[in-house]
Amino acid sequence: MSSPSRASFGSKFGIIMAAAGSAVGLGNIWRFPIETGQNGGAAFILIYIIAIALLGVPLMVAEFFIGRHAHTNAAHAYKKLSSHPFWSNIGFIGVLGGSLILCYYVVVAGWVLKYMFLSLDGTLSTLFTPGDASGYESLFGNFVSSTWSPLIFMVLFVLMCHFAIAAGVRKGIEKLSKIFMPALFVILVVLVGFSLFAPGAQEGLSFLFHPDFSKLTTSSVLSAIAQAFYSLSLCMGCLCTYASYFGKDVNIIKSAVSISVIDTLVAIMAGLIIFPAVFSAGISPQSGPSLAFIALPGAFQQAFGAVPAVAYIVSVLFYALLVLAALTSAISLYEVPTAYIHETWHIRRRYAALVVTAVCLMLGTVCSLSMGVLGDMHIFGKSVFDFLDYFCTTIMMPLSGVFIAIFLGWVVKRDIFMDDVTNGCTLRTTPAAVVHWLLRWVAPVLLFAAFLGVLGVI
Ligand code: TRP
């Protein structure tokens, strides 16, 4: 269902900020440095950038096209372009995947919120012992495995998302993104400035910028593709849903390129903040998922130990940055099922958001408890949290990517795509033709190969 009075974004700046807000999230500031650290630094970044150019931008254009063309939620959008029983339903993968990602994303976002308070009240600085991270290790271990504290912060975070979504597309999503994204950028620049002056920053920089191709393996190439998809919020309905609120005059390709550039810049800037601090504190760049919660609090104290006030400010700003980034991304995930429920059940947006909140709180609670009291509950040998992450990012995302690429490259008529993406032939046709070619020939092959690689077939 789409009605003439359907919501829309108010300005092009709002569109870029909202979509960039979806893309820039924990994936950039938390996941990207971890992946870079574990896959050999600069060589990984190079592959990542190639993946963004060959797969990321074309798929983002595809989602924008589908959403804007159909003018409805992600599940129903595909029905407007095909009546085939299979192709018209591939949008459901996005609605399901987006909703599942939301349920564990809010758990990590809750941790980030808690750490912002822990840095504000000085706990993170008082725990510091040079050369010994055990204080942070037990703080994090005890916190995530406890029952109530992570739940309380998760609920707080979910409520923030709920009210943003209930406020509407323009007054909620767009307004918040227009404030949060510039604020996030300012914090990033300040933190990069501080980090470049940390003693030993040089080593961190050379790790980030000198490629060592001997560290590249098939699995690091797969990780780069997965990271590119995750970071750009691809194939899980977010961009398609946002594009359904775009006006007909938006230049889809230009927007997709701008958003991808912003997202990549933010990821690299996050690397510029984290690696100098990590190297200066003598921590291994391969620390893994605990990097942001165990290694970094100490790294900040160590790197800026000479001026404790700077260490305090850097720590508070860093977690505030993570909270802002997580909020705008979680909101975009929230919007996918909210728009779907709102338009399918014909109920008010506010009530649709309530349904999403209720489900998210229930599943989120299980994910959060899977680090503690529900630790013995396993699905295919993984905790609920790990299973959801694995299932969504390694199976559903590439699968949905292959389908979307084939759908646009082979099922939808090329003329419809070309006409729509060039805004009725008022824009240059070459970029649209290149994107179509990539979607038709390059993306399906690369993605299918990546999918087989993940399953261990090749
Ligand atoms: N891109 C966001 C990040 O970097 C997370 C995110 C939001 C996401 N929407 C998504 C990931 C859709 C995959 C699919 O943190």
Image (spheres, rainbow, N blue to C red):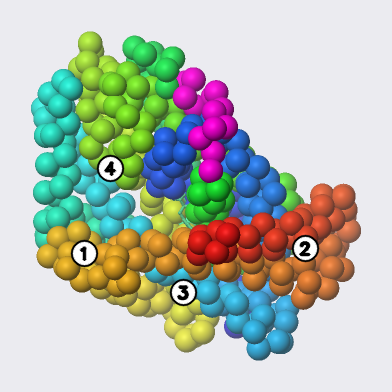
Q: Of the residues tagged 2 and 3, which is closer to the observer?
A: 2
326 is higher (above) or lower (below) than 135: below
Segment tinted magenta in the rendering: 205-217
How far apart are labels 3 and 1 at the CA level? 21 Å
Among numbered discs 2 and 3, the one appearing first in the sequence? 3
Among numbered discs 4 and 3, the one appearing first in the sequence? 3
Binning the other alpha carbons within 10 Å of mark 3 as few (below 14), some (14 to 19) or many (20 upward) gives some
Q: Which residue was labeled with disc 1?
A: 370
How far apart are labels 2 and 1 at the CA level? 41 Å
Binning the other alpha carbons within 10 Å of mark 4 as few (below 14), some (14 to 19) or many (20 upward) gives some
Among numbered discs 3 and 1, the one appearing first in the sequence? 3
Q: Residue 383, how many percent across, how many down?
A: 26, 65
> Taking 269 as reference, is 34 left or right?
left
Q: Amino acid at mark 2?
A: Arg
> Taking 168 as reference, is 12 left or right?
right
How far apart are labels 4 and 3 at the CA level? 28 Å
Binning the other alpha carbons within 10 Å of mark 2 as few (below 14), some (14 to 19) or many (20 upward) gives some
**Quadrant location of residue 65?**
bottom right
Mark 3 Cβ and ligand 1 under 8 Å apart:
no
